[in-house]
């Protein structure tokens, strides 16, 4: 077997060598209480990728033990996101598939004297939990007999008690140094309609209790979780060992993905949607996979990013600039080139008549991509910023009496600027140099500036959208997310674009502008920013 690439694989290699397992089975376990975000992509990479490396299988496991927050909408969105990233699950499984068995195991724990019904409220349980340095206080109901506990638990299931009136707790050790083992709640009363089981149940298992049982019933060999579950592992093991699971799944934790300038909390993401700060879960500014897909981030770039950052045990934070650099690298290699003008300025070539075709490489970095024809004519649009009446020193774009090359076409000289009543330049009249055509330039003129352009006769109107990060800063120590949200993070411009962008949706490098996703919104062409051309990340 090849050498392990990370500590998770090293653990698996140990288990295989010791004969504890013969085949690998993992699971990707989202809770359907919101849309998946970029952090979940790493969990997918770990769970699906590990199973694939060892020729094993991975289930899609929905942790649907909290019906008050879960929806079928989220289940459907999660499926779409996984399929978009190109992962394949062996079985689709739900915690609710096992509710009857999970309940039966709870009765078994009661009969073993390992669980009891407690009448303390959630606040009272929290108050008696103790601290990291002081033991907790045992519940006055801890001494109930198994027979009484069984009767009360069944009455809980029958709906005899109100929400919060009673709960079922594991009987472990109130003096344990691990607070998670201090008689944790494993069932609570919750009257909420479940998206799959309806109103069949009014009691629901807690995740820490259901998790090891569902893993075991699926045949999971390695439960790969993010680092916040490390302190919960002793409870995971307690449930499995107490109930006699053999072989008991092994839980291994890895560091979650944290990216600067991004909201990485489903609770806050939901708040942004509900308060209308963004247009929805799939808003291009959102770090959800639906939002990244709408923005035009390629699935391959996300998987490449996860592979590059690797799998570590220590918690860390990755700069958003690095993620953008990976996306930019991928698009640079694969995105076709096109032209659009964000702030159009009319340019008229007074000595040019008719029109002709000039060839553009679809992508100079993609072998065999070929070329495409672009119509060149007398009237064009260039960027407002590419002409100046009062140019600064070392200005290499167009100025009166100065020369610049129109990309893949001719060199032009600016002769006259037409202004409106406010002194704003609305048109530049130029002379083109016939001998300066790209690829066959015999003019002897050295034009340092190269300008992109669109043909005024064929250009289409477009709405160009640019985005800032939702969070104003990367450092949020002591701050609430709401204090950091940038409410003006979407900027919209009227642009002129090549007509083929309205006919071929996809991701493009708009020359000298950035990487954009082109698509139609009704009859309107939209150019939505994916990532800028400029790479500010210090590799």
Image (cartoon, rainbow, N blue to C red):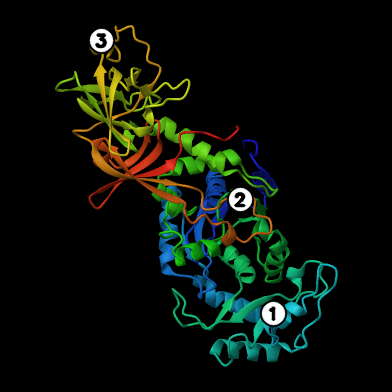
**Upstream in sequence: badge 2 or badge 1:** 1
Residue named by callout 2 = 258
Image-quadrant location for residue 10? top right
Residue named by callout 3 = 435
- Determine the CA span between mark 2 and mark 1: 34 Å
Image-quadrant location for residue 355? top left
Please state which of residues 522 and 402 is positioned toward the viewer in this rendering: 402
Q: Position of residue 102 (x, y in %)?
A: 58, 75
Q: Is residue 129 left or right of residue 52?
A: right
In the image, what residue occupies the spot 60% across and 66% down? Answer: 211
* Number of the label disc, if any, that sits on residue 169: 1
- Determine the CA span between mark 1 and mark 3: 87 Å
Q: Position of residue 50 (x, y in %)?
A: 57, 47
Secondary-structure class at tag 3: helix
**Upstream in sequence: badge 2 or badge 3:** 2
Q: Is residue 352 left or right of residue 27?
A: left
Asked if marks 1 and 3 touch (Cβ < 8 Å), the reply is no
Q: Residues within 10 Å of mark 1 (few under 14, many from 20)?
A: many
**Upstream in sequence: badge 1 or badge 3:** 1
Q: Quadrant of the C terminus?
A: top right
In the image, what residue occupies the spot 23% across and 36% down? Answer: 459
Q: Residues within 10 Å of mark 3 (few under 14, many from 20)?
A: some
Q: Quadrant of the N terminus?
A: top right
Image-quadrant location for residue 230? bottom right
Secondary-structure class at tag 2: loop
- Determine the CA span between mark 2 and mark 3: 56 Å
Q: Is residue 444 above or below residue 304?
A: above
């Amino acid at each position: 077997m090849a050498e392990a690439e990370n500590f998770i694989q090293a653990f698996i290699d140990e288990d295989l060598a010791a004969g504890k397992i013969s085949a690998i089975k993992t699971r990707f376990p989202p809770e359907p209480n919101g849309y998946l975000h970029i952090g979940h992509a790493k969990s997918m990479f770990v769970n699906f990728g590990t199973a694939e490396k060892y020729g094993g299988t991975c289930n899609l496991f929905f942790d649907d033990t909290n019906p008050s927050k879960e929806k079928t909408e989220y289940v459907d969105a999660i499926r779409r996101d996984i399929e978009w990233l190109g992962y394949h699950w062996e079985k689709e499984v739900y915690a609710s598939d096992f509710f009857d068995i999970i309940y039966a195991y709870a009765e078994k724990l009661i009969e073993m004297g390992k669980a009891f019904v407690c009448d303390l409220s959630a606040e009272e349980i929290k108050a008696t939990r103790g601290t990291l340095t002081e033991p907790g206080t045992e519940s006055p109901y801890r001494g109930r007999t198994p027979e009484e506990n069984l009767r009360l638990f069944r009455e809980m299931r029958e709906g005899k008690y109100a929400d919060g009136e009673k709960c079922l707790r594991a009987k472990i050790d109130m003096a344990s140094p691990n607070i998670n083992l201090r008689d944790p709640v494993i069932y609570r009363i919750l009257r909420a309609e479940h998206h799959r089981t309806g109103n069949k149940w009014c009691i629901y298992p807690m995740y820490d209790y259901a998790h090891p049982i569902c893993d075991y019933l699926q045949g999971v060999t390695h439960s790969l979780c993010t680092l916040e579950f490390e302190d919960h592992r002793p409870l995971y093991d307690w449930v499995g060992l107490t109930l006699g699971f053999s072989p008991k799944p092994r839980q291994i934790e890895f560091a979650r993905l944290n990216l600067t300038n991004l909201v990485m909390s489903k609770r806050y993401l939901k708040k942004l949607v509900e308060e209308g700060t963004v247009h929805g879960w799939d808003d291009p500014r959102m770090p959800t996979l639906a939002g990244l897909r709408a923005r035009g981030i390629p699935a391959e770039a996300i998987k490449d990013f996860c592979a590059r950052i690797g799998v570590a045990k220590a918690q860390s934070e990755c700069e958003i600039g690095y993620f953008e650099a990976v996306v930019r690298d991928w698009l640079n290699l694969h995105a076709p080139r096109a032209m659009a003008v964000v702030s159009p300025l009319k340019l008229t070539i007074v000595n040019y008549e008719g029109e002709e075709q000039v060839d553009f490489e679809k992508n100079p970095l993609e072998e065999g991509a070929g070329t495409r024809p672009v119509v060149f004519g007398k009237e064009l649009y260039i960027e407002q910023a590419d002409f100046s009446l009062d140019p600064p020193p070392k200005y290499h774009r167009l100025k009166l009496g100065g020369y610049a090359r129109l990309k893949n076409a001719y060199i032009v000289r600016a002769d006259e600027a037409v202004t409106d009543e406010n002194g704003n330049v609305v048109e530049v009249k130029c002379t083109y140099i016939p001998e300066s055509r790209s690829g066959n330039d015999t003019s002897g003129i050295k034009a340092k500036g190269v300008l992109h352009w669109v043909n005024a006769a064929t250009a289409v109107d477009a709405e160009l959208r640019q985005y800032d990060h939702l969070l104003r800063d990367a450092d949020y120590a002591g701050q609430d997310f709401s204090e950091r949200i940038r409410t003006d993070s979407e900027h919209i411009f009227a642009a002129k674009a090549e007509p083929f962008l309205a006919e071929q949706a996809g991701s493009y490098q708009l020359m000298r502008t950035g990487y954009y996703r082109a698509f139609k919104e009704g009859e309107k062409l939209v150019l939505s920013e994916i990532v800028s051309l400029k790479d500010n990340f210090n590799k």
